[in-house]
Amino acid sequence: MHVALGLNTFRAVTRASGYVKYLTTLPEPQEPTISTASIPGPKSLELKKKLNTMQLADMVNFFVDYESSTGNYLCDVDGNVMLDVYMQISSIPLGYNHPRLLNVFNNDKNVKALINRPALGFFPGKDWPVRLENILKQIAPKGLNNITTMMCGSCANENAYKNIFIAYVRKKRGEEGNFTEEEMNSCMMNMPPGAPNLSLLSFQGSFHGRTMGALATTHSKYIHKIDFPSLDWPVAAFPNYKYPLEENERGNKEEDEKCLTQVEELIEAYSKKDRPVAGIIVEPIQSEGGDNHASPEFFQQLQYITKKYDISLLIDEVQTGGGCTGKFWCYEHFNLPSPPEIVTFSKKLQLGGYFHTSEYRPRETLRIFNTWMGDPAKILLLEEIINVIKEDQLLEQVQKSGKVLKTGLLQLEKEYPHLVNSTRGRGTFLAIDFETPELRDTVIAQLRKWGVHAGGCGKQSLRFRPALTFKEKHANIVLDRLRKVLYET
C-alpha cells in the first residue's frame, strides 16, 4: 500500500509553510498507508504509558498527530495514515483541518471571541443575539424558535429535562401560580412538594449522557451506570427489528405495537404510583446502544401518546443531528404531524444545546443557568460549517456516498452471511452486525491494520460515522478493505 503524498513529505511541506492553517491545501492521500506492525504503534504505547501515570488511560486506542491529519484521513503519532469513518464518535463534520475552519480564527475579531470567553447568561457580547439569529436559527427544527446553548450533549439533555419538569409543574400550578413557602423549603431538603416525584420515560438501549439526570435515562451498557445512585424512572423496550426490513415487515410492525403498548402501560403505572411521567426522551437512532432503528410510524405513534397524556417529547439528536443521515435532523425522516417540543444537539454542531417551543421557556431567571451557557467561539466554527454544507451540497453528497456504502455492505452480507448481517441506516449513518462481539472486535482491529479506522456500538455492531465530506471513492476503499478482512477471517 502507498499514498500519493507520503507523510514525511506532507509534514515537510507543512513545516516549510510555517502555518498549520495551510495544511489542507495539500490533497488528501489517495489511500491509507500503515507503517507499524500493529496499532497502537510504539510511540502511541509510550505516550499511553506516560498518560497512565496521571489518569486511567485504558480506553486510549492510539495517539493522533492532528497537525498531519487531513480531510477524511487521520494520522497517528507512529506515521500510520487511516481513512477515518468514526470521526471522533461522529463529532467532526468536515474532516480534519478543513481550510475554511482553519481560517475562522485568522482575524483579530474572532480571536478575541476565542480568548475573552464570556459568562453568557450574565455578560454576552454585543453580537450574541445576532449570532443566534443568523446561525442557530437558520438550522432550527421547524417550529422551535427558542434556543438554549450549553457546552455538550450531556448538559444539553440534563438541562432540557429541567425545562420539561418546569413546564409540567407550571401546567399543574397554573400560569399565575407562585411558589409556596412549603415548596421553597422542601426543595432545599430534596423533598416534595418542592422537589416533586416526577419522572421521564426512556428506552432500553438508549444513551443520553453521563451526568446524573441524563444517566438515569441511559441504558446501553452497565459500565456507564454501576455504583451510581439513580432515579426510579420508567424504561420501555425499544423496537428490536429483524433485517432485511422488506422481508420482516409484519414482525417489525408487531414489535412497534408491543413497544408502544408498553410505553402507555408504564405511563399509567407511574401515574398510579404517584411518580407521573412528565415527558419521553428518545434518540431517532439509538447510537451507542447498537444503531437500533424504529420506523416513522413508531415515532408518529409515540408523539401521539405524548399528546394524549399531555406530556413532552424530547428528541435527542446529539449524534444524529448535523446532516449525517441525509437530512439535517434525523427526525425529519419521520414526517411527524407537528414538531417535538424539544430537540437537543451537540457533536457535529460543535457546542451543545437545545431548540424548544416558547412554552418551555422558564419564567424565572437562573433556573436554567451555568457559567458558560455555551461558547461563542464554537458558534463561529458552526457558522462556517453551515456555509460549507450549503455551498458544497454536502447533504446530497451524504446521500450519494451513503448509497454506495450501504449497497456494498449488503453485498458483503451475501458474500459472508456466516459473518455479517443486518445492514441498516440512513445516509452515511450506517451499521452492520457480526455473529459475535469477539468477531466484531477482531474485525475493527484488523481494519486498522488495513488503514480503516471504525468504531463499535452495542454488543456486536460496527458503526460508520464518516465526515460529511466522505465521498464515493472513500466508501469504495472502506468496502475493499472490509472485504479483505472478512476474507481473511
Image (cartoon, grey):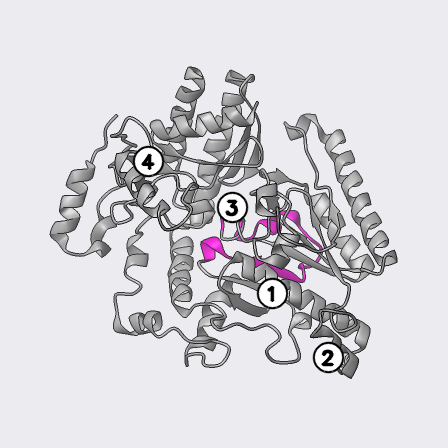
Q: Residue at 42% of width from left, 27% of height from top?
A: 479
Q: Amino acid at mark 4?
A: Met
Q: Is residue 292 above or below residue 440?
A: below
> Which mark sits nearer the N-terminus, 1 or 4?
4
Q: Secondary structure at mark 4?
A: strand
Q: In this view, which residue lies farthest toward the left?
A: 16
Callout 4 crowding tier (Cα within 10 Å): few <14, some 14–19, many ≥20: many
Whole-Å distance between the Cαs marked 3 and 2? Answer: 47 Å
The quadrant of the rendering that contains the C terminus is top left
Q: Which residue is mark 4?
A: 82
Q: Amino acid at mark 3?
A: Gly
Whole-Å distance between the Cαs marked 2 and 1? Answer: 20 Å
Q: Which residue is mark 1?
A: 159
Q: Secondary structure at mark 1?
A: helix
Quarter where residue 173 is shown: bottom right
Quarter where residue 8 is shown: top left
Q: In this rendering, does residue 299 appear at all?
A: yes
- Magenta run includes residue 381: no
**Residue 167 point in image, percent of width and height:** 72, 70
Q: Amino acid at mark 1?
A: Asn
Q: In this rendering, does residue 467 appear at all?
A: no
Quarter where residue 33 is shown: top left
Give the extent of the magenta segment. 323-349
